[in-house]
Image (cartoon, rainbow, N blue to C red):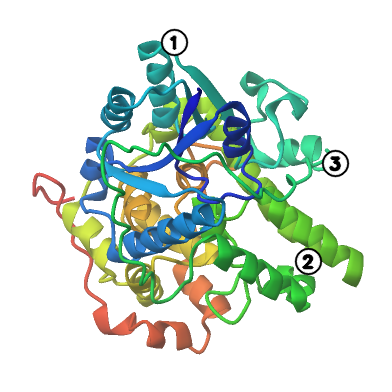
C-alpha cells in the first residue's frame, strides 16, 4: 500500500496540475495539505508589516475553493500552520508515507526546503513537476546557467516554441486514509477579498467571461491604464496562486484567436505571459540573488533607509498624490495595475532613495497576485540591479499623472490628494540627509 502526501503551494487547483496527477498515479491513498508558513525574518525585517487582510482573505477563499474542487474528486484539503519541515515530519510520524509530491517552485527557499526533505527522508519517493510554467525546462534552447540576461533575447528564443497541451480532465483522486490521526482542519473563513473573487472555479469563470467578449483585441491599448473595466486581463491573481495554469490561459487565448482572429493586442497577452515565464526561469537560475541588494548585476544602488519616508510610502502619505492613491488602492484591495507598480516602485527607489528590497517585501505582504519571481524580478528591474539592460527605470510622476490620470479621477477616488505630506529627510540614525 503506497500512501502519498501532496503539498499544495502556488498550485491551488486540481485541473491541469501535473505534479498532483503524477503523484496520484503512483499511490493507492493520498493526503492533500497546504502549509501556512510564518513570515520569514528576512521579509519581516524589510516589509515592516504582516500579511495584509486583503491578501489573507484572498488566500482563504482560494483554499476554500481548492477544498471544494478536491471534494468533487473524493478528496479533502488539510491546512496546517508552521514550517514545512515540522509539518511534514508530523505527517510522516502519524502515517506511513511512501511518496511525497509537489509542484516545482521558483523560489530558492522552497527549493532548499524540498532538497532538505529529500535528504532527511531517503526512503520516501519524491515526485515534482512543473505546474506553473508555460514550458518544460528541457524545451528551453539553453541551460539555466545560460539564461539571457534580459527579456528580449529570451523572448526571441522561446516565443515560437510549442506550448505543451493542458492535461485531460481529472475525474478522480485516490482516497485519503480511513483512520486519520487528527480531525480535518477547519477551513478558513471563505468570505474572501471584497474586491476580487478567487479560487479555481472563479478563475475558469473569469477566463470564459474575458474571452467571450472581444476586449482581448484591444488589450495593448488599455493595458497601461490605472483602473477600469477589463483594461487588463485580470489573470494575475489566479496565476499567482495557481488557481489557473499559464497553459490554461494560453489555451483560452489560442481559442479566442482562432474565432476572432489574432492581432497585436492578442499577441501582447502572450507577450506578457512570456514576461512572467522569463522571471520564472530567472528565479530558478539566480536563486538567492533574487533577494540580494546588488541583485544579479553586482551593482551597488545609492540609497539608505529612511524609516519615515518608507512609512509615508507604505501608508500613501508622500508628496505625490498619484503615488498615494496607488498605495491606498493596494492597501485596501491587495492589487494595483502594472503601470501603477512601476510608478510607485520608481518613486521609492528614485524620489525617496530607499533600498528597493523594502518595497519588494512590502508588496509581498500585500499583493493578492504576489509571485516570488515576478515581484522580486520586477523590483530588481526598476532598481537597475536585474534584467533591465538600461540599468533601471525612473518614471516622472507628474508626466505619468498627466498621461494616465489627466482628470485626476483615480487620485480623487483613492484620496491621494487628501494625504499629501512633506517628505521626511532624516536617515535611519536621525542625521539630516
State the residue in front, 366 or 171.
171
- Element marked by disc 3: loop
Q: Mark 1 touching mark 3, by CB under 8 A? A: no
x, y percentage for residue 228?
57, 81
The answer to whether 372 is drawn above or below residue 97 in the figure is: below
Disc 3: which residue: 160
How far, Cα to Cα, is label 2 from label 3?
17 Å
Q: Quadrant of residue 150?
A: top right
At a point 47% along the width and 88% down the height, the residue shown is 409
Label 1 – label 3 distance at C-alpha:
41 Å
- Tell us which disc is closer to us: 1 or 2: 1
Task: Give the residue displayed 26% in from the left and 49% down from the top.
Answer: 47
Quickly name the residue at label 2.
265
Element at label 2: helix
388 versus 432 height, above or below:
above
In this rendering, the label closer to the viewer, 1 or 3: 1
Amino acid at each position: 500500500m503506497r500512501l502519498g502526501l501532496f503539498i499544495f503551494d502556488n498550485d491551488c487547483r486540481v485541473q491541469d496540475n501535473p505534479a498532483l496527477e503524477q503523484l496520484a498515479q503512483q499511490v493507492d491513498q493520498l493526503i492533500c495539505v497546504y502549509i501556512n508558513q510564518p513570515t520569514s525574518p528576512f521579509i519581516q525585517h524589510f516589509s515592516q508589516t504582516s500579511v495584509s487582510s486583503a491578501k489573507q482573505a484572498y488566500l482563504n477563499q482560494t483554499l476554500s475553493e481548492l477544498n471544494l474542487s478536491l471534494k468533487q474528486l473524493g478528496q479533502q484539503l488539510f491546512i496546517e500552520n508552521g514550517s514545512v519541515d515540522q509539518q511534514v515530519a508530523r505527517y510522516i510520524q502519524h502515517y506511513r508515507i511512501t511518496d511525497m509530491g509537489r509542484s516545482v517552485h521558483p523560489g530558492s527557499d522552497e527549493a532548499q526546503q524540498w532538497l532538505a526533505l529529500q535528504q532527511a527522508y531517503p526512503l520516501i519517493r519524491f515526485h515534482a513537476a512543473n505546474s506553473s510554467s508555460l514550458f518544460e525546462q528541457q524545451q528551453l534552447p539553453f541551460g539555466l546557467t545560460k539564461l539571457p540576461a534580459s527579456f528580449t533575447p529570451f523572448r526571441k528564443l522561446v516565443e515560437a516554441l510549442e506550448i505543451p497541451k493542458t492535461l485531460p480532465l481529472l475525474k478522480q483522486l485516490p482516497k485519503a486514509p480511513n483512520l486519520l490521526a487528527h480531525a480535518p482542519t477547519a477551513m478558513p473563513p471563505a468570505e474572501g477579498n471584497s474586491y476580487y473573487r478567487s479560487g479555481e472555479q472563479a478563475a475558469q469563470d473569469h477566463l470564459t467571461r474575458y474571452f467571450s467578449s472581444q476586449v482581448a483585441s484591444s488589450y495593448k491599448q488599455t493595458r497601461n491604464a490605472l483602473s477600469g473595466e477589463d483594461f487588463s486581463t485580470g489573470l494575475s491573481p489566479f496565476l499567482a496562486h495557481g488557481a489557473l495554469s499559464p497553459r490554461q490561459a494560453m489555451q483560452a487565448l489560442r481559442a479566442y484567436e482562432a474565432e476572432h482572429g489574432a492581432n497585436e493586442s492578442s499577441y501582447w497577452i502572450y507577450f506578457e505571459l512570456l514576461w512572467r515565464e522569463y522571471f520564472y526561469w530567472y528565479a530558478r537560475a539566480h536563486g538567492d540573488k533574487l533577494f540580494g541588494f546588488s541583485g544579479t548585476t553586482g551593482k551597488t544602488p545609492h540609497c539608505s533607509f529612511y524609516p519615515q519616508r518608507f512609512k509615508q510610502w507604505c501608508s500613501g502619505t508622500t508628496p505625490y498624490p498619484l503615488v498615494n492613491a496607488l498605495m491606498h488602492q493596494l492597501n485596501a484591495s491587495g492589487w494595483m495595475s502594472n503601470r501603477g507598480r512601476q510608478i510607485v516602485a520608481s518613486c521609492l527607489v528614485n524620489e525617496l532613495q530607499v533600498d528597493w528590497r523594502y518595497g519588494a517585501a512590502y508588496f509581498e505582504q500585500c499583493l493578492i497576485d504576489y509571485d516570488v519571481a515576478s515581484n522580486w524580478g520586477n523590483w530588481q528591474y526598476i532598481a537597475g540591479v536585474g534584467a533591465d539592460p538600461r540599468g533601471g527605470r525612473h518614471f516622472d510622476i507628474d508626466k505619468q499623472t498627466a498621461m494616465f490620470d489627466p482628470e485626476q479621477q483615480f487620485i480623487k477616488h483613492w484620496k491621494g490628494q487628501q494625504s499629501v505630506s512633506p517628505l521626511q529627510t532624516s536617515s535611519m540614525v536621525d542625521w539630516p540627509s
